[in-house]
Amino acid sequence: MPETQVLRAYRFALDPTDAERAALGRYAGACRWAYNYALAKKTESHRAWMARRARYLDAGLSEAEAKSRIKADGAGLTDRIKVWDHHRRSLMATTSGKQHRAMFQPPAGQEVLDRQLAAARADAVATGRESLLLAEARTAVNSLKAEAFRAGFRTPSAMDTSALWRMDRDRPAEAGGSPWWGEVNVYCFTSGFDRAQAAWKNWLESLSGRRAGRRAGYPRFKTKGRAAESFALFHDVKRPIIRLDGYRRLVMPGLGSIRIHGTGKTLARLVGRGRAVIQSVTLTRGGHRWYACVLAKVLQDIPLLWEHIADDGVRTPYLTRAQADTAAERTGRVKQVGRPTARQRSGGPVGVDLGSRYLALSSPLRPGDPTSTLVEHPRLLTNHLAELTKRQRALARTAKGSRRRAKAADRLVRVHHQIAVRRASSLHGVSKQLATGFTHVVIEDLDLLALSASDTGVPGDPGRDVKIKARLNRNLLDAGLGELRRQLAYKTIWYGSQLVVLDKGEPVAGTCAKCAERNPSSAPSRSGYNCPSCGAVPHRHDQSTANIVHAARRQLKTVASDRGETLNARRASVSPGAHKGSRQAVSKREGTG
């Protein structure tokens, strides 16, 4: 079986002492402070840019002209930053003993400044003042960038925010500093800056339409008590600090050794045999527990891989064919390495009908057990509604800010957390069985946001059957169908199978699986299906799963494989590289020309 490196996360529930729990809270607070600090810098720069744009728009300029004018206004400051940054990089290379080989052409109008800085570097090398000059260059670059950020010419990145924070961190808290920064690990601030950068990027990409899914709003500040407590720690993999101490303790920088629930035997043995390298750890508070998610690069057996073979014979493995095809767009070819396991080949493709009560399968989930074609959801939220109602009422009867309210909130959060953990455990078991038991796992591309939308309507147009729709929405969200699809997306790659997502609008519920005749009057809510053509009366689950498999086979036939040519978009068996005359002849012979 071929091997390749994959990133895997190992999640451990921590068992900290009171002192360790307080330290975890401080680290999470530092990460939240860093996020708010970075977001404040970005927001300040963005508001300054919007103010400049508004002035130009009020003056009668168009949107494009206003943006071009703002760019021209900041060109001089931007060019100065480029020259000073080249000066800083050259000094860094000199102090580290490396040669700075990057060719630099100073922007127009900055030639005098570039010559002055070059002379200062030469003088510093002669007198041994490189380190002192480097500190001055860093201060100058950061000051110029801060000026550009305040003016709205640039938006600070995560690295820019980190540089600005180093200038402000020793200031008093009233002046925006963090004089307590030495009490926590510096990676708490780094992870906060990175998360602010990710939130800002998501908003920009969603605003421009480059990001799919629900519209991401403008990033908001995190407040204590409402935002999730979480932070990330990193280390040098060549000199690892994050490691398992035995099987029951986890060592982390700044926090020391913390006991874990359960055992870390699997990860510890992989690291001991040299098959895993720990990259980072993310600590998150969920309910009344702290969890450590250890990210490791693991050398894993993958039943099916795709290799890109370059023209010079270099082989590069990829987990999916799409990645290998992208690498082979310019040169080389793609070769399949390995094949699905015997159990997967015997299972073949399986159609999965996603429902709020059952997961209906076209084949038994457990071989030899015909009753396993219907997998019932545990309905954890429904079964705990009475307890949640009791806890919510107890919370509502307390005074805001009181100690009793804090205890009541903890009891309510604990129940919600237990429901989430048990749901995740159930979905992990089902997704692994599907990924390891079949060659293809076929599901529908459901719009869960639209399916679970409220039906209350508006004052002038009230909704119908609001209570029934609300109960259906609760059951859909309780099933966790979106999480199941997310788990199948990466587990099918790990275990050598393939996830096939049908196109939206595929008529799997209103089409007869026997004669392929559609019945538009057949409602998906009915348990049976009546075919007006052949008279078949199958069960709705059998009908849907069979149609899902049929649709997947049609979809897979139109995708090129490594076993010869398949049908093209016009359903013609013609190679893309065939001669033009032969293509025309085949088209005439098949009646398509």
Image (cartoon, rainbow, N blue to C red):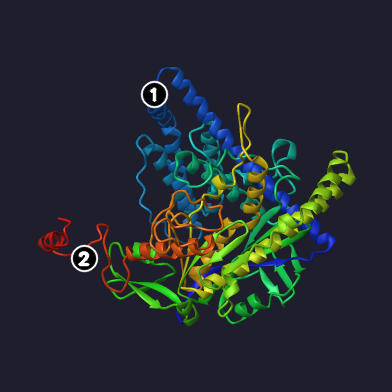
Q: Answer above or below: position of 118 versus 150.
A: below
Q: Label 2 crowding class (10 Å Cα cut-off): few <14, some 14-19, many 20+?
A: few
Along the horizontal axis of the image, is 2 left or right of 573?
right
Can residue 295 be seen here? The reply is no
User: Mark 2 = which residue?
Assistant: 575
- Residue that appears at 30% across and 62% down: 329
SS category of the residue bearing label 2: loop
Q: Nearer the viewer, residue 231 or 91?
A: 231
Q: 194 or 215: which is nearer to us?
A: 215
Please name the residue shown 58% across and 63% down the image.
359
Q: Quick one: 416 or 175, which is closer to the camera? A: 416
Q: Position of residue 36 (x, y in %)?
A: 65, 42
| Amino acid identity at mark 2 | Ser
Q: Which mark is residue 218?
A: none
Q: Position of residue 12 (x, y in %)?
A: 70, 67
Q: Which residue is mark 1?
A: 62
Q: At label 1, which amino acid type do we have?
A: Ser
Q: Quadrant of the C terminus?
A: bottom left
Q: Residue furthest top?
A: 59
